[in-house]
Image (cartoon, grey):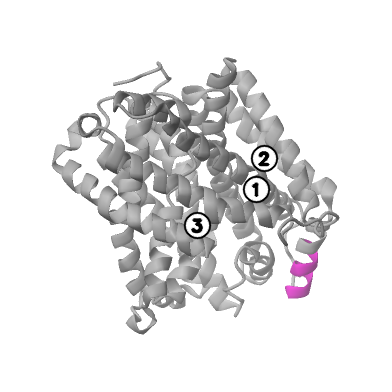
Amino acid sequence: MVSTGNAMWSSRFAFIMASVGFAVGLGNIWRFPYVTGENGGSAFVLIYLLCAVAIGIPCLMAELLVGRRGGGSPPTAMAAVAAESGRSERWKVVGGLGVVTAYTIAITYAVVVGWVLWYLARAISAGFVGFDAATAEATFSGLLADNQAMVLWTLVGNLIVGGIIYAGVTAGIERAVTIMMPLMFSLLVGLSIYNYFAGGFIETLQWLFTPDFSKVSGATFLAAVGQAFFSIGVGMGGMMTYGAYLPRDFSIARGAGTIVLADTLIALLAGFVVFPAVFHFGLDMASGPGLIFQTLPVAFAQMPGGGVFAVLFFVMLSVAGVTSMVGLLESVTSWTKEKLNVSRQRSTILVVGSVTTLSVVSVLSYNIWADYQLLGMNFNELTEALYDKLFLPMAGLLVALFTGWFMHRDASQDELRDDSQWFGLWRGLTRFIVVPAVALILITGLV
């Protein structure tokens, strides 16, 4: 085993909470329930679960075992494990790609977290009384045109994230996630129960769990493969970094299974928070991210207790956004700390400060810089295309390729010695299922 003496998670619970917090992002709240309903309800859920087991869990195990084996930031861990396996240390480029991916995502994601915090402040201060579709649209458009407000709330979000990372693994990340994730889960359950009585719950149940195999096609399988890969947070270096903090007696297979199960459960539970209002008030469920910022405020204005519901909903979203940002920037902070040989505190300031600065470009690209384009895309569109279509699947593919075909069998078997009954299955899935599946995601995204 190669190790650089990283801090360690103090408990299995803290690691699971941090990993689930990283995996569960704002996209889970609206995208997974919608994709499920559009692709055959429970028929899609069944296919997704198979993909999550056959693709998601092996991908996650691969990142965790490399992180723990290498004991450092993603580039350091990849280089160390490659050298131990008699391979070129140039494999560190794969870890570097994960760090670049995380940093690229964080630049635009920070702005969206800022939107959530702005709406939380609005829900607390004034609420959404009297909102109709036109008012909701005008409010969101007004926010996108207000550079000062977007920069301010992006800064607030980044200061919260930076404060958590600055404090360290135990005092910062652990302390935050062990409070925030149970809070988020409690809010999801509580808001779901509220919706059971408020209306639209039965329609949501039918939308999510009525099997419609007529909707199942090749595209359905591709959607399930993509959802299984993208929703658990692999390819961004975060899980590899969190793996570096794992103690030797932790079961990677059981941990990965728990994370994927929790991620799926929260995504489905989010459906019972978001979609009852959509059905009950006849709103547009296909409005994507706009569902959160333009569609739901109209529902909050009409439902009994909508003011309280709105506050709790945006608290829940804020937790999802902040914990995801922590996972993204922890991998970048870890690498910067090693590369520049500086303290965690200084590394955090450098990383969060630079992300905040570049987020201003993202803010301006929603209005006055929207027409400045490269390859027919503005800054935000180009950034999203890079990480969504290229960086993420390429990083995931190369990690799977390395652990399945190039990492020495004895090294990976040693890391999974507590899961010896699963080792052969994991290696077979990684080699013959994960590599082709993620390659397919990469190719179809580029095409």
Compared to residue 277, the image places residue 434 above or below, namely: above
Q: CA distance from mark 2 to mark 3?
A: 19 Å
What x and y, as percent, mark residue 94?
46, 37
Looking at the image, residue 405 sits to the left or right of residue 207; the answer is: left
| Dot 2 or dot 3, earlier in sequence | 3
- Identify the residue under disc 3: 28
Which quadrant of the structure image shows residue 375?
A: bottom right
Image position of 171 with respect to 237: above or below: above
Q: In which image quadrant can residue 234 be found?
A: top left
- Residue farthest along the bottom direction in this orientation: 214
- Stretch in magenta: 133-139
Left-right relation of 133 to 109: right
The residue under label 1 is 113
Dots 2, 1 in contact, CB < 8 A: yes
Are the residues tagged 1 and 3 within 8 Å (C-beta)? no
Residue at the spot x=82%, y=57% of the render? 367
Which numbered dot is residue 157?
2
For disc 2, the neighbor class at 10 Å (few under 14, some 14 to 19, many from 20) is many
